[in-house]
């Protein structure tokens, strides 16, 4: 038969186990938060790189347009000379 001391002992063991599991859950939550932060940082870095690549592509397209206009001007100059 269980006595008050036995129930108290079981309650203490249960409380200890709950405290232990709560600590483990908090540790896992902290690890998850850290991982989420790393993912968000990587995402931000990727977006920055993506923006820089887009700027480079825009500059390349501008250069190609400028080159085309120069070729047209040279062609017109040739036509005027000849």
Image: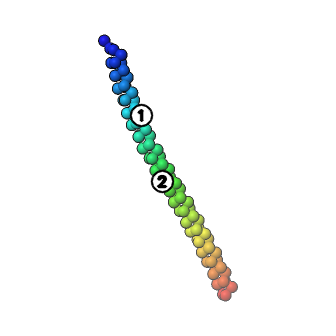
| Residue situated furthest front in the rendering | 5
Q: Residue furthest left?
A: 1
Is 32 placed above or below 67 here? above
Left or right? Give the position of 28 relative to 52: left
Whether tag 1 and tag 2 are in contact, CB under 8 A, the answer is: no
Residue 29 can be seen, yes or no: yes
Between 77 and 62, the one lying in front of the other is 62
Task: Name the residue rendered at 67%, 87% in the picture.
Answer: 81
Label of residue 75 in the image: none
Residue 7 falls in image quadrant: top left
Q: Is residue 81 above or below residue 59?
A: below
Q: Which residue is mark 1?
A: 22
Question: Which residue position is annotated with label 2?
Answer: 42
Tell me the quarter of the picture where residue 15 sits.
top left
Badge 2 marks a residue whose secondary structure is: helix
Along the viewing direction, whichever of 27 and 77 lies nearer the viewer: 27
């Amino acid at each position: 038969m269980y006595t008050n001391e036995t129930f108290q002992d079981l309650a203490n063991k249960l409380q200890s186990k709950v405290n232990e599991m709560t600590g483990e859950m908090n540790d896992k939550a902290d690890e998850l938060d850290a991982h989420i932060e790393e993912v968000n940082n990587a995402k931000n870095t990727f977006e920055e790189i993506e923006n820089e690549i887009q700027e480079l592509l825009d500059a390349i397209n501008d250069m190609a347009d400028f080159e085309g206009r120069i070729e047209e001007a040279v062609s017109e100059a040739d036509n005027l000379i000849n």
